[in-house]
Amino acid sequence: MTRNPAENSPVTLLGLGAMGTALAGTWLDAGHPLTVWNRTPARAEALVPEGATAADSAASAVAANPLVIVCLLDDASVGAALEGVDLTGKDLVNLTTTTPAQARPRSAWAEARGARYLDGGIMAVPPMVGVPEAGGYVFYSGSRELFEEHRETLAVPVGTVYVGEDAGFAALHDVALLSAMYGMFGGVAHAFALIRREDIDPTAFAPLLSGWIAAMAGPAVLQTAAQLKSGDLTADVVSSLEMQVAGTATFLATAEQQGVSPELIDPYFELMRRRLAVGSGEEDLTGVVDLLLR
Ligand code: NDP
């Protein structure tokens, strides 16, 4: 990392919560001149000894530099912070977590005020910021020009993954990955509940469980994608839907015997049964995807 500010483009950052503060530290460490603003000024002033310039308003922070990064609580706080602020000629990068339906009008809102707009979805927690080996990154969508122009600066805190011109796509990718994560956490909770009352050390069980999830998840995700793309839900099936639906009886009986509620796994089993009723038993589980579309 270079520490020569003259060689690095200046950055304005609005929002110094847990995430904003972590981001700020990486640009300062890399030698980017950094202007910061936070609603509660003490958080901005705390970065002055580190080399940041604390602006006394969001408007003056935005005026200071062409590249403006925003990392606030939610879309409403972005609107509040930037209300009446002149965005003419600015490159606005919004890392605030939102829904796609908030990101798209926010993009149009910024463009109507003369700014280029890039939306971001942060796939990292603060301790992963500035730690390349932690594997964190940000999904970006919106202005490709803005992304290409500021690519190196944006890559300072964590990696970058550009997913398209539609400003809503970063938020959609973010939520899709996190939704899958919560589904997985649901399965993990059910698995620990099954062994909870037994003489099984959860810390000995854990590597078995995490290893199994890792072994199953990668191939299953790729198989689902390939079948969705080709439209052939019977291609390369290893475990048929018919066999898997029959197997659910074992899982539900075991939950019953262990005194564990099936409330996390049975909704998925119900979708498998519904797909078997209307689809082919020679498929695997991909047919469940379209049953979710309303
Ligand atoms: P924090 O709660 O730590 O900070 C929230 C920030 O938003 C503070 O700077 C706060 O200012 C500001 N803020 C809240 N409301 C307003 C408002 N009405 N007007 C102006 N400023 C406001 O959140 P994080 O820093 O952790 O998160 C920031 C964003 O990053 C969120 O969208 C979050 O979803 C996302 N993110 C966070 C992750 C995490 O693990 N922390 C992981 C991935 C994404 P003040 O200091 O005055 O309260």
Image (cartoon, helix red, strand yellow):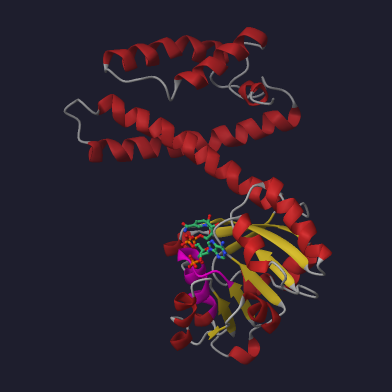
Which x, y percent locates residue 245?
Answer: 51, 12
In the displayed structure image, the side of residue 110 where residue 260 appears, left or right: left
Q: Is residue 177 above or below residue 116?
A: above
Q: Is residue 240 visible?
A: no
Residue at 44% in and 13% down: 247
The majority secondary structure of the magenta stretch comes to: helix
Does residue 53 lie above or below 265 as drawn? Answer: below
Task: Decide: is 225 above or below 5.
Answer: above
Work out which quarter of the rendered image holds the C terminus and state it.
top right
**In the shown orientation, is residue 223 left or right of residue 265?**
right
Task: Please name the residue shown 77% across and 60% down the image.
Answer: 109
- Give above or below for 130 relative to 200: below
Residue at position x 67%, y 66% in the image: 93
Left or right, 85 with reference to 97: right
Residue 203 figure quarter? top left
Q: In the depicted view, which residue is nearer to us: 169 or 233?
A: 169
Residue 114 is one of the magenta-drawn residues: no
Out of 123 and 52, give the one closest to the viewer: 52
Count of all numbered marks drawn on residues in the image: 0
Which x, y percent locates residue 256? 31, 13
Q: Please tell me whether residue 26 belongs to the stretch shown in magenta.
A: yes
How far across and how far down the image is residue 181, in percent? 49, 40
Q: Magenta stretch?
A: 14-27
Quarter of image, res 70: bottom right
Work out whether residue 207 can be spotted. yes
Towards the viewer: 242 or 65: 65
Rendered location of residue 89, percent (x, y): 80, 75
Q: Measuring 76% from the left and 68% from the top, which residue is drawn there?
A: 146
